[in-house]
Amino acid sequence: MEKLLEIKNLHAEVGGKEILKGIDLTVNYGEIHAIMGPNGSGKSTLSNVLAGREGYEVTEGEVIYKGKNLLELEPEERAREGIFMAFQYPVEIPGVNNSYFLKAALNAKLKHEGKPEIDAMDFLTLVRDRMKIVEMDDKFMSRGVNEGFSGGEKKRNEILQMAVLEPTLAILDETDSGLDIDALRIVAEGVNKLRSPERSVIMVTHYQRLLDYIVPDFVHVLSDGRIIKSGDKSLALELEEKGYGWLLGEDEAA
Amino acid sequence: MSSTDVLDEVVGSEYKHGFVTDIESDILPPGLNEDTIRFISAQKEEPEWLLQFRLDAYRHWLTMDQPDWAKLNIDPIDYQAISYWAAPKSKDDGPKSLDEVDPKLLETYEKLGIPLAERAALAGVAVDAVFDSVSVATTFKDKLAKEGIIFCSFSEAVKDHPDLVKEYLGSVVPTGDNYFAALNSAVFSDGSFVYIPKGVRCPMELSTYFRINASNTGQFERTLIVADEGAYVSYLEGCTAPMRDENQLHAAVVELVVQKDAQIKYSTVQNWYPGDENGVGGIYNFVTKRADCRGDNAKVSWTQVETGSAITWKYPSCVLRGDNSVGEFYSVALTNNYQQADTGTKMIHLGKNTSSTIISKGISAGHGQQSYRGLVKVAASADGARNYSQCDSMLLGDQCGAHTFPYIEAKNPTAQVEHEASTSKISEDQLFYCQQRGLGVEDAVSMIVNGFAKEVIRELPMEFAVEAQKLLGVSLENAVG
Amino acid sequence: MSTMEHYRQIFADADMVGKDIDWLAAGREKALAEFEQSGFPTSRNEDWKYTRVNPIEKKAWNWSGKTCVGLDPEDLNDYVFERKNSHVLVFVNGWFQPQLSTKHELPQGVTLSSMAAQIADGADELKPYLGKIAQNNNGFMALNTAFSNDGAYLHVAQNVTLDKPVQLVFIATRQSDPVFTNTRNLIVLERGAQAQVVETYGFISGEPENFTNAITEAVVAEGARLYHNIAQRESEQGYHVSTVAATVAKDGHFEQNAIAIGARLMRTDINVALTEPGAHATLNGLYLPHKRQHMDYHTFIDHAAPRCTSEEVYRGVLDDAGRGVFNGKVLVREGAVQTNADQSNKNLLLSKQAEVDTKPQLEIFNDDVKCSHGATIGQLNDLHIFYLRSRGLDEGQARSMLTYAFANEVVNRISLEPLRDRMSMAILDRMPGGEELKKLV
């Protein structure tokens, strides 16, 4: 199988404090990886480093994406190359209209791919179609980006953006946090509809419950900035049953 | 009893420091001219350069007009009707030790709750007591001297440390800075001088207690505090005056010099006589206070609780020259009866990554009028400057006023300035809630006001915080209409 | 010749409208005397601390009589929207131009005319209002009162709603002599009346160095509603000084949007007096100085009666060496109980040379109030920029989108849709990356 993403010995700091202490991870096309771990283990840091957020400084290691050095790309270049991060806390941007924002993002990507920009009618058709996936109402498109949205609406908006931008690598940063069961189902279905052999997903989550809806190929446990255990979906179930303490203890014993 | 009656009763509580000390004093007849200044300078055996400093200031003052831009109603002040020198008569050149201090003076300070005898003194607080125009006693001097700290009256500093005084005097507040600063520079009598050497953390709070006793006198004290590189000091001042029918003038200048990595914390509880309930008498309190953060990482913090004076006019300011220097201003001002206060701060951001915080809480009751007046200035050089200001006013009674005049000037695109202000009356819901839980109106008001002022009070050293809370309670108790 | 002699001279020479009407002539004479007394304001005056008017003072401005202009209505398309659906009164260099204007049939009880025509036909109708709402608070206002001849007059009778908006379009053209225009508008809404008015200040033919010195007086009677807009799009070589003075009676409603795009130097004072219980004022404003433009908004809301409310939203976007001034004063008088007043002023500094001075003021003389103000100066939010970039927008695009959103906070408050669209476009014309954004919005 062809490699999409290869993370080698990745170390990263936030505000001078080392959070990631040597991550190794390979994601092939079409795979879904779940990254689990207790609070403060570095899960969100990993997501943000991959998306290129300022303030997350890589001190060692490399990240190869589609055969290229990901770390030297600007955030928007990564996005145009097909990396999409669904934010744990989607930002409210008052006054920036959801619809034209998304159109600008899509056009930036199309332009990058050497394709013509989408016209207004086609865009509308596309968005309406994708909105069905996340069961969103038309009225959200005329509002500001996430402005005044409930927690669930924000997460659905993230998935809508993902469905429109059709990324190659989707990173879902704690997308399940703060969602009630209905919203969780809608979000999960949205992700499942986008599953394809050309697309990979990294799901960062604290709980196993999301994995009931989006079944991963691999599960990794992150603790103190390192992956301490990898396995298939049964690892998640075991974790659910025994808690993180079990693994952390095991790690210490080893 | 209605809540109004209760308030009247509470507000009607008397000024507790209004007694007069019957002491033999040398008082210069009223009037101001160059001879007055020469007299003061001669009395204090000052060097020629200091006399010249005074005369320059006086000549500049003559060219100036009293500012009228503050939102204050001030009866014209006759500067020729004021006596510019009043000193307790002493046999010799002044007391050499506490034993030589007139027992009546010691008694005065005991009454004020400031024992000057070191054995009885407040633990951990060194006190310089200023009575009318002169410093009468400074405690713990020797102990501080061991650390290399100089804490003495200004007059002594002129005699014993002339080079330090000469270097720093007028370097933060120039003689011609404003009308009252110019007047002070010409006629200042005494005050405190503090020097903290490099790297020294002053082991105790330093405190000055000011007392105006003589009638028809002005008090013009001068305070100069220098924190050398890496030094730290916390300094407190308290003020009281007897009750008199005429207005008395207090025009002080405080200069703080904060070098690299140094920090000065300056706290004031100002409780000059505010005048009676009809607005007769009281102190005119016109004060210039400024700190100059000269080095990187310097920090200065002004905390003030202003409950006294008929008129208060003061804007403790910070010049943030050094990179990463920090200025803070925490203020509670309370005006009742016919008191007027126009107070606030100036934060002048010059250095990179300088930051400032302004928290101002105004409480207005009776016919009290109060203004917050502030300036936040970000110069083009101040990359990354930050300011946060919050000015809240609480109104108690329908005859009072609360006004907010913030000036914000920004010339740097990386600056972030945020100002918020609100004005509202004391919450009836809160009052009712407290009453429903069994509290009397006066206790409820006092409690709510103290809660309102808490952000500022908690910046005060412990002894002062307790005093400040009591003062607020006493000064405020009639505030609900 | 001194400044004063100059104005005295042209005052004597000018062929003023209604010069035979005693009260009007006397008012002008008195105003000129006031101007001679006060002169132009200086920065020693606290209200003019941040705005120096020397460039205006230095020039000997001339009074312009009626001039013939060879313009077609189409030439004004930039400034006029939906002629078919609004009343349009066009003024060129201060004088009403019927051939460029469009007046549809007016509802019963509505007068809409040029001030000059009204002075000629029925000056007495103006007498109770002119100079009564706007006092001559400074030299500019006195100068306007002395020299004003034309402008617009709108009177809406009791309970009449003027359904079509009224557009007042003031155009400056290039002239050989520097010319000042002293436009004077009067809007009177009787009890329960409603109207929407747009004042647009623009220019045609090159960038004239003109000086607009305007005053608008507005009376909003009990229960009446006035929606007032000002689009200041003067030449960047020109000067614009104006005052809007409004009084709002019981349960009346005054809503205003002021957008400043043009002029080298602008100073606009907006004074609203809430004189009776239940009156309301909304003031929104946006200033966008760039290059070396200087824009100064002074707003003053006078809460003089119980239960009045006011709301104020002002935003500034400052680029290049642009300078912005905001002074927002709210006065709550004794007895004006149950007052609710809220004010917000936010500024975005885009350049190293830009400067903003903001001064929100609250003066409150009774205890039964809820008043607040907030002012900020800052930059675009880093997290917002990152979010947009993480979706593929480049940094420049992200910045212009966020800047546009910031400015639009005010524009979106304009209730008149075609004007809102016009203003959005005008802002985009001004912004870096605006052209690209236009394609999206």
Image (cartoon, coloured by chain):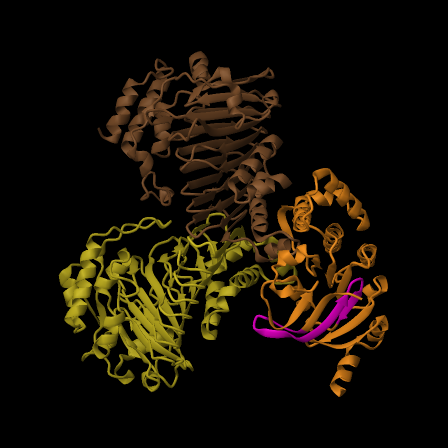
Q: Is residue B33 rendered to the left or right of residue B443?
A: left
Give the answer, above or below, for where B134 lies relative to C120. below
Give the prevailing secondary structure in the magenta stretch.
strand
Quick check: is A13 in the magenta stretch? Answer: yes
Q: Nearer the viewer, residue C89 or A42?
A: A42
Chain identifier, brown in the render:
C
Above or below: residue B101 compared with residue C54:
below
Image quadrant holding the N terminus of chain B, namely: bottom right
Q: Quadrant of residue B97?
A: bottom left
The residue at the point 60 percent across, 64 percent down is A72
Q: Quadrant of residue B163?
A: bottom left
Q: Looking at the rendering, which quadrant does residue A167 occupy?
A: bottom right
Q: Is residue B246 above or below residue C429?
A: below
User: Could you tell me how many numbered marks the image carries?
Assistant: 0
In the image, residue B470 sits, relative to residue C360, either above or below, namely: below
Residue B187 screen position, x and y as percent: 22, 64
The chain drawn in yellow is B
* Residue B29 appears in the figure: no
State the residue in front, B181 or B72: B181
Percent across and percent down for residue B237 are 37, 70
* Side of C38 where B371 appears, left or right: right
Query: What tint does the image give chain A?
Result: orange
Name the residue: 33% across, 73% down: B226
Question: What percent of the width, then of the height, locates residue A68?
Answer: 66, 64
Q: Say if residue A254 shows up in the picture.
A: yes
Q: Give the residues drawn in magenta, as a range.
A: A9-36
Name the foreground residue: C58 vs B365: C58
The furthest residue to the left: B35
Q: Percent from the top left, x then y, of residue B457?
A: 49, 67
Would you say residue A196 sits in the magenta stretch? Answer: no
